[in-house]
Image (spheres, rainbow, N blue to C red):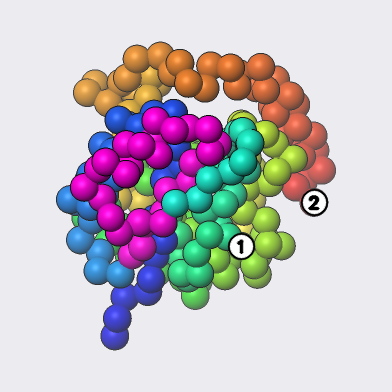
Amino acid sequence: MSEPAVGICVVTYKRPQQLLKALSWIQERTRYPNYKLYVIIDHEEDSATIGALVRSRFTDYTVEMFTSRVECVKATNRCNSIGDEPYFVYLSDDMEVEEGWLQEAMKCMQTIPNGNGLVVFKDGIQNGRNACAGLISRNYIRAHLGGIFYNEVYVHFSADTELFKKSRTRNRLRYCPTSVVWHNHWGGSGGHKSGKDVIYTGSRYLLAADRAMLRKRIQEEFR
């Protein structure tokens, strides 16, 4: 029996060198036999990223670009609609997969009833406490989340927290510590701690509004 198809989506904006590293790690360390690679570019004005992809050695991928800046939530949501694989992974360009990561995540997915749910990785920061990256079933989104992946009542923050909380309440969440996807971020540790993020600094003004929306959604019990 062939393995279920998985879409691997990498969301990026104006960080071409980080993106190329992320794609290299995916292609070199993914042993899962049935996946398709997607790159989601937040804004088509990101000519540096487009140029870097054209000049790179990567050929087997699909690119999606937005005509205007849409911020993290809407860009990540495109991971759900760009492909038709039963499962997809959503990642950002500052993440580094380790050997065997996708096989392990798919094993964890099979511990969820009917293989329909959300698996989150060991990332060095959240480690099972949020869903800023993960492997998810499209059937789970349709059948258990009302067709909503990242809720676009948020703009840049907190959609991952809502998804995590709803999935945990429904017992459709698994943390997979054997699936390692490091988040090379200023909040990381050791060799995976990066410098301050200068690209998304301008998005931080959205933090208070998105957190207020999350509090409201929790009071509404995510209805």
Q: Is residue 125 magenta?
A: no
x and y percentages locating residue 38 in the rendered image: 41, 54
x and y percentages locating residue 53 in the rendered image: 33, 42
Q: Please report the residue visible at 67 percent of the width from the left and 22 percent of the height from the top.
A: 206
Q: Quadrant of residue 123?
A: top left
In the picture provided, is 164 more to the left or to the right than 148?
left
Give the spatial CA distance, label 1 vs label 2: 15 Å
Q: Which residues fall within the magenta stretch?
A: 35-62
**As displayed, is residue 203 above or below residue 165?**
above
Q: Is residue 148 visible?
A: yes
Tell which circle, 1 or 2, labels the residue nearer the N-terminal end.
Answer: 1
Q: Is residue 108 visible?
A: no
- The dot on residue 106 is none
In the picture provided, is 26 more to the left or to the right than 132?
left
Name the secondary structure under disc 1. helix
Name the secondary structure under disc 2. loop
**As displayed, is residue 16 above or below residue 76?**
above
In the picture provided, is 178 more to the left or to the right than 136?
left
Could you classify mark 1 by the number of other residues whose Cα lies within 10 Å: few (under 14), some (14-19), or many (20 or more)? Answer: some
Could you classify mark 2 by the number of other residues whose Cα lies within 10 Å: few (under 14), some (14-19), or many (20 or more)? Answer: few
Q: Looking at this view, is 26 or 178 the one in front?
A: 26
Q: Please report the residue visible at 46 percent of the width from the left and 69 percent of the height from the top.
A: 85
Q: Please report the residue visible at 57 percent of the width from the left and 70 percent of the height from the top.
A: 139
Q: Please report the residue visible at 48 percent of the width from the left and 32 percent of the height from the top.
A: 46
Quickly name the residue at label 2.
Answer: 223
Q: Image quadrant for the N terminus?
A: bottom left
x and y percentages locating residue 18 in the rendered image: 32, 31
Q: Quadrant of residue 30?
A: bottom left
Quickly name the residue at label 1.
Answer: 141
Say what amino acid the circle numbered 1 marks.
Ile
